[in-house]
Image (cartoon, rainbow, N blue to C red):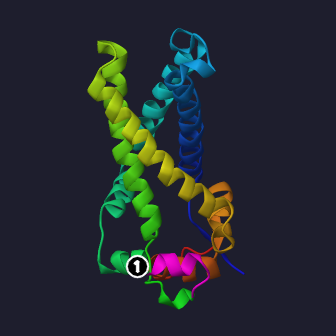
Amino acid sequence: MKDIERFRKRAIFHHWWIVLCSFLLAVTGLFMFMETLSPGAMGGYSRIIHRFAALGFVAVPIIYFVLNPKTSLEWLKEAFTWNTDDIGWLQAAPEYYFGGPEENMPPQGRSNTGQKLWMVVVIITGVVFVITGAVMMFSGVSGVAVILHDIAFIAGGAMFLVHFFLAVFHPRMSEAMRSMITGKASEDYVKSHHGKWYEEVVAKGEQS
């Protein structure tokens, strides 16, 4: 069975770096939000780690964009470009993920609709995190900034749990995790889950 390259090493590193930074930000953020769990967290290690993780969360995507502008713009365009197949995917997804027939799912591009939705949420909440975090860091704690920061955390956290469950535990998505580790997925998986993109890959002769 042939494998198809889904992600290059830079993209894989970028993904797991964001995962690491997000984990550190979430844990230290919770300690600061629920200070009773970590006495002195606002002025202690949690706050320091939170700021360094925030710096990494911002810096690496910028560096990645500078080094890979074409690829980055392609991903952004795909994330924010939606059509009738995306609407159909959202309608068919609940049945599919609970064991429904795969043929009811509309053909997808390099990212399926759920992945595109996840990217949109990450981008929007990421921007909110950076802006509100900067306000709180340099201008002192602001009520509006705190509320928006918390809303972004709740929205992003909820979507992350869905993303994590599907990628790690759902039997139909097992190769999604493999592709984010090795960079490759089987031809059958790509054909069934990313039919539109598969046709583009075949046309370019990019199977390995």
Q: Mark 1 highlights which residue?
A: 91
Q: Which of 12 and 42 lies nearest the eye of the viewer?
A: 42
Residue 90 x/y as whole percent: 41, 74
Q: Is residue 128 above or below residue 2?
A: above
Q: Where residue 144 sits: x, y (%)?
A: 27, 28
Q: Which image quadrant: the C terminus?
A: bottom right
Marks counted in the figure total: 1
The structure residue drawn at horizontal position 50% and vertical position 29%, both measured from the top left corner, is 56
* Rendered location of residue 65, percent (x, y): 39, 43
In the rendered structure, does residue 98 fall within the stretch colored magenta?
A: yes
At a point 57% along the width and 75% down the height, the residue shown is 97
Examine the residues drawn in magenta and state their main secondary structure.
Answer: helix
In the rendered view, tell whether residue 204 sits above or below residue 127.
below
> Which residue is painted at 52% across and 51% down in the image?
160
| Residue 51 seen by the camera | yes
Q: Which residues are magenta?
A: 92-100
Task: Compare residues 110 and 125 and report the one nearer the observer.
Answer: 125
Q: Residue at x 56, y 14 (%)?
A: 41
